[in-house]
Amino acid sequence: MQFVPLFNRIFEQSIVDYHKTDNVDQPINNPYELKSIEYYLYLKNWIDTVQWHLEDIIRDPDIDPVAALALKRRIDKSNQDRTDLVELIDSYFLDTFKDVRVAPDATINTESPAWAVDRLSILHLKIYHMKQETLRAGTDEAHRTQAQNKLNVLEEQLKDLSGSIEQLLADIAAGRKKMRVYKQMKMYNDPELNPVLYGTAK
């Protein structure tokens, strides 16, 4: 199975669907079967897309401080949701490759497949928004040229990253690489691990 064309297609679909209304509060309408890998990929990119726009909103210099705090907490929750979803997608890969006979000299990649897919999702967002900058009305030729140059680099990165992920998954399927997944163990949202939340901050 060629995984990466599926990833790229679903990420592009999610971004286009979001921008039909371009509203961070719009409900998701995930078109894929619940708990399928396609469902999780669409959800992953949707979360990324909403967070992209929340990060834009919170940088408004005139934002109300109370609203900014609420947004910051929403972004924190989004980051936790993203992490949980990446780990779930890695579980899919672990299950997919569970019967692979791993070579004795198999090596471990610097990141798990799902964390590479996370970077792919964000890269699609960069490409979409940089492309908008090449088309934005009211900008001068210098702005459009600069945006196009950056877009060219991003599209080259997409080709490289897509190929690297496909190669990683092929290596895992062939037993040349072994999957080793470490939980992120984020501490800031955990009332047992964040000293501010458990009340012992100094």
Image (tube, helix red, strand yellow):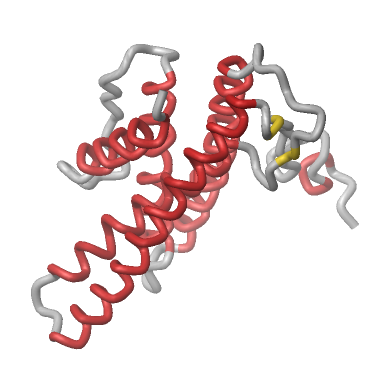
- Give residue 180's quadrant in the image: top right
Residue 183, position as x, y percentages in the image? 72, 33
Image quarter of the C terminus: bottom right
Residue drawn at (43%, 50%), measured in percent from left and top?
122
- Give residue 77's quadrant in the image: top right
Residue 177, position as x, y percentages in the image? 68, 34
Q: Is residue 137 above or below residue 84?
A: below
Residue drawn at (10%, 78%), measured in percent from left and top?
138
- Give residue 104's quadrant in the image: top right
Residue 183 as seen in the image, left or right of residue 63: right
Q: Is residue 43 above or below residue 52?
A: above
Residue drawn at (18%, 78%), measured in percent from left and top?
144
Residue 12 as seen in the image, left or right of residue 42: left
Q: Nearer the viewer, residue 93 or 159?
A: 159
Image quarter of the N terminus: top left
Residue 57, position as x, y percentages in the image? 36, 59
Residue 43 as seen in the image, left or right of residue 147: right
Q: Is residue 141 above or below residue 178?
A: below
Count of numbered labels shown in the rendering: 0
- Observer able to see residue 46: no
Q: Residue at the far left: name it.
A: 137
Residue 109, position as x, y percentages in the image? 68, 43
